[in-house]
Amino acid sequence: MALKSSIQFALFCCLLAGLGPSLFAQATGCLLYTSFYEVAKDYYMHFIPDAEQLMPGVTKDVMDSPDNLWMKGLTKEQIHQQIEYYKKRYNQ
């Protein structure tokens, strides 16, 4: 029984040795994406609201920067422009 399990373990190790680099690359990308997502979620959903609650107005400069315009959404005119652009682009 021990011999059978040690052979299976050796085969498993050979399999992992061949797949190792691709698994490592995939795992690294997934881990990095997950880490960025967690940091951004905590920043926008917890840190910014808490800071605004403690000191009203302190986050105004940060949230009004061009990097954070996505939080405000689009105007009706901008939405219409995007719809027309994609209709023209894809001939619909």
Image (cartoon, rainbow, N blue to C red):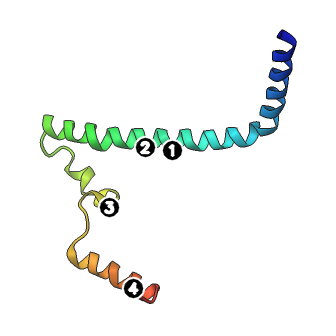
Indicate which disc, 2 or 4, sits on the residue closer to the N terminus.
Answer: 2
Residue to which mark 4 is pinned:
87
Q: Looking at the picture, how far across and down is residue 22, in whole percent?
A: 72, 43
Give, as a three-letter code, the residue at label 1. Answer: Tyr
The disc label shown at residue 66, or none: 3
Q: CA distance from mark 1 to mark 3?
A: 23 Å
Mark 3 element type: helix
Q: Looking at the picture, how far across and down is residue 58, in whole percent?
A: 18, 43
Marks 2 and 1 close (CB-CB < 8 Å): yes
- In the picture provided, is 73 more to the left or to the right than 8? left
Q: In front here: 69 or 90?
A: 90
Mark 2 element type: helix
Q: CA distance from mark 4 to mark 1?
A: 32 Å
- In the picture provided, is 61 more to the left or to the right than 23? left
- Residue visible at 46% across and 42% down? 36
Rendered-image quadrant of the C terminus:
bottom left
Disc 2: CA contacts within 10 A as few (<14), some (14-19) or many (>=20): few
Residue to which mark 2 is pinned:
37
The disc label shown at residue 46, or none: none
Indicate which disc, 1 or 3, sits on the residue closer to the N terminus.
Answer: 1
